[in-house]
Amino acid sequence: AYYEPNIRFLPGSEAGKITMSVSSKNAALQFRAAKKNGAGKETSLATSGKDAFEINESGDYILYSSIHDQPIHRFERPIRISKATNAFVSLKQNASTSYPGDGAFTLLNGIINTKGMMRSNEFLGFSGSDCEAILDFKSPITLREVMVHGMEQHSSWIYAPKDVEVFTSNDGVNFETVETNLVDIRKQPRNPVFAIGIGFKTRVARYLKVVVKNAGTIEAGYPGAGNKSWLFVSEVEVN
């Protein structure tokens, strides 16, 4: 739309930061971003370039657009910053071209999908394959928990993962299995999105491999039976 801004979340200038970049077909649009502080108060964000705003802490953020001080658009989104934010991330296998998100960075951009297919661009979608990601923190850090956010919607052949495996390494080549325990599965009533928490004994490592296992061939009696299931992942948090 002519008056609707295009908003993208990109790697920030350093670890623990992301950049909200805004553009529009309408050159007259002006943008302002702020973080909600509660009780109706806000803190404006400084720009980190033309129509770009850097975010370095979790919270609810708002983008306002206007023309000649007349409000046009209001965009609000919760952002979650974790140790994974702005780490270097690579995928063993790219997501489907039908649901590519913003590439591998989708997993670390702080955006946790809460609207399901209404915002399908916030997911990486894998048809019949696992989501296997390697995170490079650039130096060893303390690790104790991984949280995987995704979606399950059987009518669309999208199924929850059958398992999540975690590995650590200090050279990026030799990975050691982490003995994990399922912390919780949080799912909201009548909402297809979920979060799986994986806890483990504290360890220090530079690299973290997270393998979110596809459910495989859909079983008889379920929508899409006999076909490959879809795996949808929106974010990987690390603490």
Image: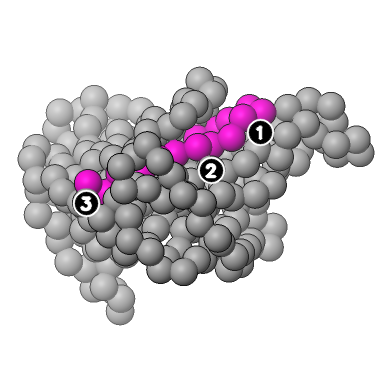
Q: Amino acid at mark 2?
A: Val
Residue position marked by numbered label 1 in the rendering: 230
Q: Which mark is residue 46?
A: none
Residue positioned 48% across, 46% down in the render: 210
Secondary structure of the residue carrying tag 3 is strand
Horizontal placement of 180 versus 70: left or right?
A: right
Residue 49 found in image quarter:
top left
At which x and y percent is residue 58?
31, 63
Residue positioned 61% across, 47% down in the render: 151
Q: Quadrant of the N terminus?
A: top left
Q: Amino acid at mark 3?
A: Ser
Q: Compared to 150, does 238 lie above or below?
A: below
At which x and y percent is residue 227?
78, 25
**Residue mark closest to the camera, 1 vs 3:** 3
Residue positioned 22% across, 32% down in the render: 23
Q: Compared to 161, does 104 lie above or below?
A: above
Residue position marked by numbered label 3 in the rendering: 139
Q: Is residue 12 visible?
A: yes
**Residue mark closest to the camera, 2 vs 3:** 3
The answer for how far apart the CA atoms under marks 2 and 3 are is 21 Å
Horizontal placement of 89 versus 41: left or right?
A: right
Residue position marked by numbered label 2 in the rendering: 211
